[in-house]
Structures are given as structure tokens and as C-alpha cells.
Amino acid sequence: MARKKKDLPVLENILITDVAAEGKALARVDDLVVFVPFVVPGDVVDLKVQRKKHSYAEAVAIRFHQLSDKRSQPFCPHFGVCGGCKWQILPYEEQIRYKQKQVMDNLTRIGKIELPPCSPILGSQKTREYRNKLEFGFSNKRWLTNEQIASGVEFPHREAVGFHTSGSFDKILPIEECHLMDDINNRLRNGIRDYAYEHSLTFFDAREHIGLLRGMMIRLSNTGELMLLLQFCITNEEELHQSKEMLQWIHDNYLEVSSLLWVNNTKYNDTFGDLPVECFSGTDHIYLKMENLRFKVGPKSFYQTNTDQAYVLYKVARDFAQLTGNELVYDLYTGTGTIANFVARQARQVIGIEYVPEAIEDAKVNSQINGIQNTLFFAGDMKDILNRDFIQQHGQPDVIITDPPRAGMHQDVIDAILFASPQRIVYVSCNPATQARDLQLLDQQYQVTRIQPVDMFPHTQHVENVVQLTRR
């Protein structure tokens, strides 16, 4: 017999006191820490507990008694339902203040190492329309809000294009208006949606794995180029014909699109890194510029999604590297070689290592088109490539720049860095928690000498952090 669920309490007149992880805020009720979304410090609310453990709980606000004076009006019509941009209700000055606090809390609490003072966080000049890449999904199951369900109104279309909702892999929240990118994202997405409705095209069913329209990716360059990739699930000749007709319609109606690509994905997941990408019209890549450099970016390439702040971030990394022109630099997790090429003219040689082979090919091209001849690039798993043999063959680095994914660095990579024993390490991180863990492992040989947070993602809880380590 199933155990009856306990009734969870309502907590009344609770003051929200701080900002926590994952874009949530927190309150303290006696010895209980309560995490709450879509509230800000200073709000006084009634909370309905959704989940309770011994020392913490998760809750939602069901009534507001007092609104914080640190609250701003959300600008997006999808706020509160869409999982992104959760901090719109917090003024930007407060957002970056909490992000700096988050960085130092992580480095102190997890790292438990000696730290220098933290430099003031570098905020983003643009707080809207700052992204150069967006991805949307198609679904035959439109996400309905509680209010829409309660209204009993029948919608003319149950198909939707937009973002996946938290906790539901097969439903899509329809997006009419997104402020993360230039308005071209809205015109493209909504125009393609309307074309699909008009021509009765099928939207993807994530449970049955059928439906022609599966996903779309938009990349926008500061050179004026625009890449659009459509992800189809084509299982017959009719669907192939429909997809080609749609691509021709896009080509004829959206002259801004300089790179129109498509991929047929019949797999059980949305990733297409292992699939061939077809070019319908234009080029199979776009270029982004930074300083006096141009970078080729393909559909599978990694590039920082905030173009302007990427420049700020990389200037910090170059400054922390303290290059004089005589150094051998290893650039770990090099992606399309952006950092490697950005610092190459201040170094003797730069060696970049990256897991994705296509990105490494782009990195080589990026060196060629910029006339840079002192770079070498290698593709493969970091923990397999960066070993003692590699270091002995290519030389002991004077500086290592590392920009790993959110999971941080594998123990083998840290061991290889310690063996390489560079004079300086510049650690660029999108996750201060795993960065702090890795800094503790490096602490036996390296002292943290500079800390610089950089905000790449306004209205979200995410923050980048750059740390300089100097050999003891």
C-alpha cells in the first residue's frame, strides 16, 4: 500500500533575506533554510512548502504582504513561467553584487584556501539582447500554465516552438517574445511557426520520436552575419520534400540569413554533434570579430554566447597571463581557439587542446585567416592528451590558461598541470563551485594571486570568474 503523502505546511509572514543558487532566494525559519523562486531579498511572503528535508525546504510564494524596495518590474511577458532570466525582478546593480558574493562564498566555503581581495565584478554593458546564440525546440505538446488550464479555453494549436520547461522533457513553452537576442530571433521563430501551422507540418513528439520539426538554432554575429540551423526528424520522402520547401521559403523571405543549414536527427536525443550538417544556402559558417581578429564559427563550434563580454573576459585572461612574448602557453579546452589566438601575438607559442575535432579545425582556420603562425592545436579528451609524454614532447609551459566546462577539470588534468609546473595558471570558469574545488587541489603548489568575476549573463544567476595562480 502506498504511503500517504504528508501535508506540507504554509509558512506565514516570512522575510526573504538573501539570494541562493539556481536563481532562487532564501529565507530562514528557525533552523530551516527555505529556497524560493521568483522572490527577492526584502519581500515578505507566505510560503507553501513543496518539499522538505531535515535542514532545508523548497517552497513557492503564494501571497505577498510586502514588496522589497530592491525589486524591479520584469520586462519579459514569459517571466515566471519560462525557466530563464529569473533575476529580472532584481535591479542589475543588485544582481552583480550578489554574483560577486556568490563567487567569494564558493571560493571561501569550498576552496578553503588563502585568497587575495576580489576585484569588483565587471558588469555587462548590454543587459538585453546580448546573446549571439539561441536554441528553440518544437513540440506537439504545448506547455499550458495553471491559469490556462483553469480557464478551459481551447487553443487552436497544441503545437509550440520555444523553450523546454523545467521538469518536463516532452513539453515546450511557446515563446512569442524573447529579449535575449536581437528581435530577428522573434521574427524567425514566429515566422517559421506560422508557416508550419499554415502548411500543417508536424511538430516533434518526444515520446513517440516522430514529427518533422524538431529544433532550431540561431547564431548572430557582430559582423552582421546570421546562421540558422533547422533540426528535422525526416523518416520518409514526403517529409524530405516538406523540409526542402520550408528551407526554400526561409531563403526567399529572410534575406538576413547568410548561413542556412539543416540536419536530419532521428536519434533519441537532440544533440547533433555526431551528425552531418547540410548547407542549404549561403556559407556553412559565420565570422565573429574581436579586437583585430576574426573567428570562424560553425554550427558545432563553441563560442562564448555574449560577444561583447567575451572580449572583456578574454582581456582579463590575457592580462592575468602577464605575457612578454617569450612564453610557451598551453590553452586547455580551447574551443575554436578564441583565447589561444587572442593571446598568440603576446606569446612565443600557444598550444590549444579541445575535445571536439570540428572546433579544432576551426581553431586552425582562425589562426590562418588572422595570419597567426605560432599556434598548434590538438583534438581529443583532455585527460588523455595532456599527459607527461605530451608535455615532454612539446615543452614545459610557462603559462597554462584553462577554461573547462561546468564540471571543472578531471583529476588527471590537474595532476598533469601540477607535473607541467608552469609559472602561472589562468583559470577561467563558468562555475565558481567546481573552480573552488579545483583550486583546493592546486593549492599545494599554487597560490591564488588575483580574482576577477565577469558577468556574462544578465538576469540569470550564472557568473564567470577568472583566477590567477602563481607557483609557490
Image (cartoon, rainbow, N blue to C red):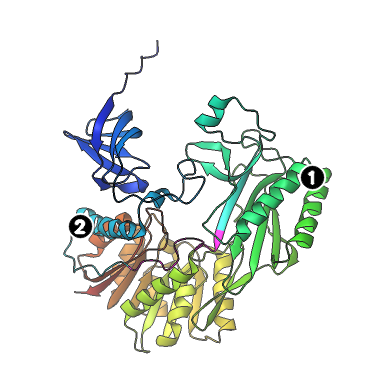
**215 within the magenta span:** no
- Image quadrant of residue 387? bottom left
Q: Amino acid at mark 2?
A: Thr
- Residue 47 to residue 408: above or below: above
Segment tinted magenta in the rendering: 122-133
Q: Where in the figure is residue 268, as x and y percent of width and height?
A: 61, 41
Q: Where in the figure is residue 271, as x and y percent of width and height?
A: 58, 50
Which of the labelled discs sits on residue 25, or is there none? none
Q: Amino acid at mark 1?
A: Glu
Dot 2 crowding, Cα within 10 Å, few <14, some 14–19, many 20+: some
Please tell me whether mark 2 sits on a helix, a strand or a loop. helix
Residue highlighted by disc 2: 108
* Label 2 or label 1, whichever comes before in sequence order: 2
- Residue 57 to residue 415: above or below: above
- The residue that appears at 40% across and 68% down in the rendered structure is 386
Q: Nearer the viewer, residue 85 or 427?
A: 85
**126 within the magenta span:** yes
Q: What predominant SS class does the magenta segment belong to?
A: loop
- The residue that appears at 31% across and 57% down in the rendered structure is 94
Residue highlighted by disc 1: 239
Please tell me whether mark 1 sits on a helix, a strand or a loop. helix
Q: Where in the figure is residue 323, as x and y percent of width and height?
A: 34, 84
Q: Nearer the viewer, residue 367 or 151?
A: 151
Looking at the image, do the residues carrying marks 2 and 1 touch, with CB atoms under 8 Å apart? Answer: no
Q: Quadrant of the C terminus?
A: bottom left
- Image quadrant of residue 237? top right
In the displayed structure, does residue 370 sit left or right of residue 275? left
Distance Cα–Cα, label 2 vs label 1: 55 Å
